[in-house]
Amino acid sequence: MTHNSNDDERPLGVGDALHGFCGGLFGRDHYDCCRVEAIGQDWVVTRADNGTVDFLSGRTQLANLRDYRKQSDYCPSNPCTVRSEA
């Protein structure tokens, strides 16, 4: 994924890939990259390639998740197996 400053400001959407630990926003046991499966105004549901589903709520937390769309900065795997579908 190419870093684009406009992408940083774009709201999260279904199909967006989120990479790595995500700053601990999903908890201390979340390490795998994941894809957004559903999103509302103040919540998001993600799924990792291994099938793990995570839920996060709060407008501030969702805004902070945008930073983790940048694969090269946060992905624990190279190459990453999770790609944005948006």
Image (spheres, helix red, strand yellow):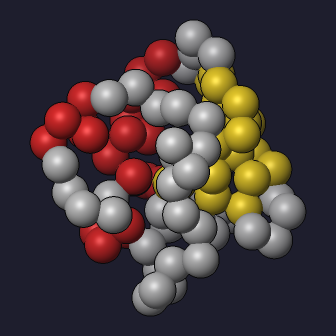
Look at 72% across and 62% down and name the residue there: 48
Q: Nearer the viewer, residue 11 or 26?
A: 11
In the image, taking residue 71 as reference, residue 80 lies left or right, namely: right
Relative height, residue 62 to residue 19 (above, below): above
In the image, taking residue 4 as reference, residue 51 lies left or right, namely: right
Look at 56% across and 51% down and name the residue there: 85
Relative height, residue 22 to residue 60 (above, below): below
Q: Nearer the viewer, residue 35 or 55?
A: 35
Considering every residue shown, the one lying at the far bottom of the view is 78
- Report if residue 35 is visible in the image: yes
- Report if residue 31 is visible in the image: no
Q: Which corner quadrant of the image does residue 64 belong to?
A: top left
- Residue 20: give x, y in percent of width and height: 50, 66
Q: Which corner quadrant of the image does residue 29 belong to?
A: bottom right
Q: Nearer the viewer, residue 62 or 82?
A: 82
Look at 59% across and 77% down and name the residue there: 81
- Residue 14: give x, y in percent of width and height: 61, 35
- Residue 77: give x, y in percent of width and height: 50, 85
Look at 25% across and 38% down and name the residue there: 8
In the image, taking residue 61 as reference, residue 9 lies left or right, namely: left
